[in-house]
Image: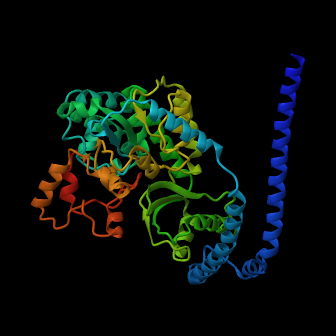
């Protein structure tokens, strides 16, 4: 027995010694590589930045120096791009030898879970998507008001919100409906009203739903649909969320901008350069600019300080950005500039009784499904205000499958068909099983208005980009420019 214990102790000491030897070897290797890299690639001389600092004299009140300022910005952008490229290359080399064990564990867990599930033909299941802000229009809700429970839903909204939401949806004015304060509750209620219509016309589509997802505010709608919270609690949460975001937007001069990128684009370096510019020359202590929405491979949405967005707008060609477009929004949503709104939302979430979801719900923050832990779901909802929406990643996760497997039926419940367009740009095969109650009505309106170009058949990448309506865009690109089309659209 003593000999057995002695052998066990010897084995454990041997394992510990072997680990220490491996760590020592890795440290020696990295140190040697760092020394070799510093010899082969000496650091960039800071004289160019010093000369630039000496020559720059910016007067924000003098409008006559705009052309000089743009040329200075371009010089700064090119120098900053060179510096950041070398830094990123060095960081990439140093991190190439390490393995992310957390991602490996997550993949192993998901693979084991797949093996334990019984096989179900995906074509018999469904996925329901809920849109975000920017899809609102005058007349939304009119086509679903007579379906079961819908009138009661609007009556409850009237009591909780303190105003007639249905009247606001039908009569506007559009300037008020586009405000965050009114747009978010309107989209939430009309989206769940569209579920009632879908349930009435195709009950199996609701019963066989295995996954649901929502864009930004639509994530709360998806959680209510999955049974995490009641309709009333979800509406109270959205009311507080909308008011807090509206207040936070008024505190800082900020905005959002969509950028269209390609393989040659250096978007990360452009963001870093914009932060450096704002910190050095705009005197912003903590400049904020980041990707707010991952829409699809060729389109991202940036959000942050207006000065940072203007820097990228002036120098987008330097970083290989193909095209940019400012969005008509009042603030930088899904960035740290929404921190004050996040605190208010956390307090509201603490008061809500939440249950684990009955079906899978995708998280905007992680791009993966929510766990059954209620505390984790609440934390993810609060983080969503200050972190980017991983919609592109969520789409790939939901529709990832082998080549021979079929795709589920996808239903978009809510105003507009913007999530359908994003689905097509991310996964055209999955889009073939996409359904929306608006489809027949759209075809009739196109024939009536003699539309020559179908919105579902864009000719090239730039035209496809024009069809995508980004979250929180009140006056973004319309699917069709005809105002009659917008007024008569329903679900």
Quarter of the figure that contains the C terminus: top left
- The location of residue 463, given as percent across then percent down, is 32, 68
What colouring does the structure picture have?
rainbow
Q: Residue furthest left?
A: 448
The answer to which of 219 and 210 lies nearer the viewer is 210
Q: Is residue 121 above or below residue 432?
A: above
- The location of residue 176, given as percent across then percent down, is 35, 48
- The location of residue 60, given as percent across then percent down, is 62, 73
Q: Is residue 219 above or below residue 447?
A: above
Residue located 62% across and 42% down the image? 102
Is residue 236 rendered to the left or right of residue 40? left
Q: Is residue 455 above or below residue 77?
A: above
Q: Residue furthest top?
A: 1
The answer to which of 181 and 196 lies nearer the viewer is 196
Q: Quadrant of residue 253?
A: bottom right
The answer to which of 4 and 170 lies nearer the viewer is 4
Q: Would residue 471 be seen by someone viewing this image from the given angle?
A: yes
Q: How many marks?
A: 0
Is residue 7 rendered to the left or right of residue 387? right
Residue located 75% across and 82% down the image? 51
Residue located 73% across and 60% down the image? 94
Q: Would residue 59 be seen by someone viewing this image from the given angle?
A: no
The answer to which of 315 and 63 lies nearer the viewer is 315
Quarter of the figure that contains the N terminus: top right
Is residue 421 rendered to the left or right of residue 14? left
Residue located 12% across and 54% down the image? 444
């Amino acid at each position: 027995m003593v000999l057995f214990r002695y052998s066990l102790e010897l084995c454990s000491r041997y394992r510990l010694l072997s680990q220490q030897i491996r760590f020592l070897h890795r440290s020696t290797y990295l140190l040697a590589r760092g020394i070799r890299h510093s010899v082969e690639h000496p650091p960039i001389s800071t004289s160019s930045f010093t000369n630039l600092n000496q020559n720059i004299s910016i007067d924000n009140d003098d409008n006559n120096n705009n052309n000089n300022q743009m040329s200075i910005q371009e010089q700064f952008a090119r120098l900053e791009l060179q510096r950041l490229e070398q830094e990123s290359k060095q960081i990439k080399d140093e991190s190439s030898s390490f393995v992310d064990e957390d991602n490996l564990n997550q993949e192993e867990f998901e693979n084991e879970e797949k093996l334990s599930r019984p096989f179900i033909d995906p074509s018999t299941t469904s996925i329901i998507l809920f849109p975000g802000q920017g899809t609102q229009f005058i007349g939304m809700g009119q086509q679903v008001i007579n379906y079961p429970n819908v009138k009661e839903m609007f009556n409850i909204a009237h009591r909780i919100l303190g105003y007639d939401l249905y009247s606001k949806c039908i009569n506007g004015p559009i300037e008020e409906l586009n405000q965050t304060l009114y747009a978010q509750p309107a989209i939430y209620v009309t989206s769940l009203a569209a579920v009632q219509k879908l349930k009435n016309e195709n009950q199996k589509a609701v019963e066989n739903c295995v996954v649901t997802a929502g864009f930004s505010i639509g994530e709360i709608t998806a959680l209510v649909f999955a049974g995490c919270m009641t309709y009333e609690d979800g509406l109270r949460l959205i009311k507080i969320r909308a008011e807090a975001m509206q207040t936070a937007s008024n505190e800082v001069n900020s905005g959002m901008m969509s950028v269209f990128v390609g393989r040659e684009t250096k978007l990360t370096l452009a963001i870093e350069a914009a932060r450096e510019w704002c910190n050095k020359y705009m005197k912003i202590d903590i400049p904020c600019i980041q990707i707010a929405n991952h829409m699809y491979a060729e389109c991202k949405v940036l959000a942050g300080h207006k000065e940072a967005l203007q820097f990228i707008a002036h120098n987008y060609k330097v970083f290989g950005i193909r095209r940019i477009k400012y969005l008509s929004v009042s603030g930088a949503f899904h960035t740290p500039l929404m921190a004050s709104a996040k605190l208010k939302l956390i307090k509201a979430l603490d008061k809500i009784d939440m249950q684990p979801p009955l079906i899978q719900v995708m998280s905007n923050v992680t791009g993966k499904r929510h766990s059954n832990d209620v505390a984790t779901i609440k934390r993810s909802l609060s983080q969503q205000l200050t972190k980017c929406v991983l919609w592109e990643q969520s789409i790939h996760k939901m529709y990832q499958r082998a080549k021979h497997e079929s795709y589920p039926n996808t239903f978009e419940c809510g105003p507009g068909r913007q999530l359908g367009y994003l689905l097509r740009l991310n996964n055209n095969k999955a889009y073939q099983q996409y359904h929306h109650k608006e489809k027949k009505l759209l075809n009739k309106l196109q024939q009536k208005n003699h539309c020559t170009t179908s919105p579902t058949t864009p000719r090239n990448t730039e035209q496809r980009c024009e069809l995508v309506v980004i979250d929180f865009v009140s006056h973004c690109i319309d699917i069709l420019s005809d105002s009659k089309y917008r007024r008569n659209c329903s679900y």
